[in-house]
Image (cartoon, rainbow, N blue to C red):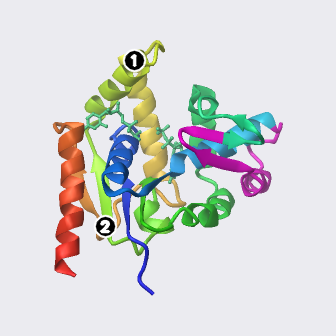
Amino acid sequence: EAAIPMITIDGPTASGKGTIAHRVAQALGWSVLDSGALYRLAALAVLDGGIDPGDEAAVARAAQDLDVRFDAGCIWMGGVDVAARIREEQVGNLASKIAAYAPLRQALLDRQRAFRRAPGLVADGRDMGTVVFPDAPLKIFLVADVQARAQRRCKQLKEKGFSANLADLLQDMRERDARDRNRANAPLAAAPDARTIDSSNLSVDATVKQVLDLWSSLGSRT
Ligand code: CDP
Ligand code: CDP
């Protein structure tokens, strides 16, 4: 039985993973897994459920029990669309902390793998190529220097009507990068067979093209 085609895109925050994942999926007619959203949903469930964020087993149980449905830009949790709420600062901060818990990561494994359905999947996160989908035929490690990433996030926030300060964003990004790279469980790292793309000086279109070109060159070899 042939494996269902898929592409993983891992990398640090604001390197463009989500944007590129959606564009590539659209071009190929595939679906998308935003794995960071699952960590944010777990964080929201912890906050709303009055769960002790330091209790690793309780946090993992909350993730196991998540009743969530992704549907055309909406994320339904217990009948409420929480797509906007999971983007809040407080939720992102907690997500980044509980993402270090091994029981939580374990609890989310099957849920993530269930997204791999025909005709194909683009999955973005930190450990898609290393842990969750180690057999993915194409693995991208998408990077950009921290200045470029902070500027992109700043622009993105301002466009959405939020206030944003470049110096604060830079500081916050460096802290998050360090947490993601240095944790013991599924740290942010390129899989040995990943292709690294540095998008610091690339447009979205050019980055999408590089990924699609890599995918086609793979197809023509088999
Ligand atoms: O998912 P991740 O946090 O890695 O990043 P994102 O939210 O998809 O992208 C951050 C911002 O960078 C978006 O506003 C993109 O339009 C912009 N951007 C990009 O993704 N890729 C480039 N090559 C240039 C800009
Ligand atoms: O806030 P940011 O855009 O950096 O992250 P996100 O992609 O929305 O993910 C939220 C948090 O979940 C991040 O702090 C990551 O550390 C964590 N995460 C993870 O550990 N593994 C993944 N596959 C995806 C996200």
Q: Amino acid at mark 1?
A: Glu
46 relative to 100 in the view: left or right: right
Amino acid carrying label 2: it is: Leu
Residue in the image at 50% along x and 67% along y: 117
Return the disc, 2 or 1, that comes first in the chain's sequence: 2
- Is ligand 1 closer than 8 angstroms to the Cβ of mark 1? yes
Q: Is residue 174 above or below residue 210?
A: above
Residues shaded magenta: 49-75
**Ligand 1 shown in quarter:** top left
Q: Is residue 55 left or right of residue 16?
A: right
Instruction: Give residue 217's position: percent from left, percent from top.
Output: 17, 68
Return the residue at label 2: 138
Quadrant hosting residue 206: top left
Quadrant (top left, top right, bottom left, bottom right) of the C terminus: bottom left
Q: Is residue 82 magenta?
A: no
Mark 1, other Cα within 10 Å: few <14 / some 14–19 / many ≥20: few
Residue 81, disc: none
Q: In terms of secondary structure, where does tag 2 sit?
A: strand
Q: Is residue 119 above or below residue 16?
A: below
Instruction: Say the numbered circle drawn on residue 159.
Output: 1
Q: Residues within 10 Å of mark 2 (few under 14, many from 20)?
A: many
CA–CA distance in space, label 2 to label 1: 32 Å
Q: Is residue 60 magenta?
A: yes
Q: Nearer the viewer, residue 106 or 138?
A: 138
